[in-house]
Image (tube, rainbow, N blue to C red):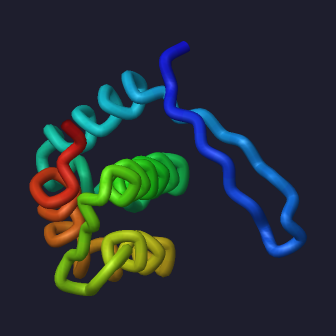
Amino acid sequence: MSGISYEIQNRKLQSYKHTFDYNFCKRKYNEYACMPLEEFKKCLSNAQKLGEIGHLCSFIYWIKNKERHEYRDTFGDYGLIHLLFHCLEGAEQVNIHAEYIHSLFKEDIRLV
């Protein structure tokens, strides 16, 4: 399995290891980035798909920061993930934020 490994530590300094499969992430990213806005909105209302989108965003931020391509959107670092959490609050929040999230996801944080 091709992947990128990283290690993080929590406050107790215990190590957690995780591997990202770049090819899988690229395929899932393309799936979400290429879908029409209305379909993307439905994904933001689905907890599992919202989780996948959040994981992909975190992965992309991690890659960009690791390569020193620091990323900032108009909300500052990780503003996109902040908006994803708003989507958990209900359909009204999804309708408010979906277009901007979709735009950031497919244009600003592009996974190449």
**Quarter of the image that includes the N terminus:** top right
Where residue 3 appears, as percent x and y from the top left, is: 51, 25
Q: Residue at x 41, y 78 (%)?
A: 82
> Along the horizontal axis of the image, is 5 left or right of 100?
right
Task: Say whether residue 22 is left or right of residue 30.
Answer: right
Count of numbered circles in the view: 0
Let me know if residue 10 appears in the view.
yes
On the question of residue 53 being in view, the answer is: no
- Residue 106, image x, y percentages: 15, 51
Residue farthest toward the bottom in the current orientation of the protein: 75
Rendered location of residue 100, percent (x, y): 16, 71
Q: Quadrant of the C terminus?
A: top left
Name the side, left or right, on which 91 lies relative to 41.
right
Q: Nearer the viewer, residue 85 or 76?
A: 76
Q: Nearer the viewer, residue 68 or 23?
A: 68
Q: Is residue 103 left or right of residue 51?
A: left
Q: Residue at x 37, y 22 (%)?
A: 23
Which residue ends up furthest to the front in the rendered image?
68
Q: Residue 54 location, x and y as percent?
A: 45, 57
In this rendering, the answer to whether 99 lies above or below 61 is: below
Looking at the picture, tell me which residue is in the foreground, 86 or 46. Answer: 86
Q: Nearer the viewer, residue 51 or 71?
A: 71
| Residue at the extreme top of the image, as rendered | 1
- Please tell me in which quadrant of the rendered image residue 45 appears: bottom left
**Residue 61 to residue 79: above or below:** above
Q: Residue at x 34, y 80 (%)?
A: 93
State the image quarter where residue 42 is shown.
bottom left
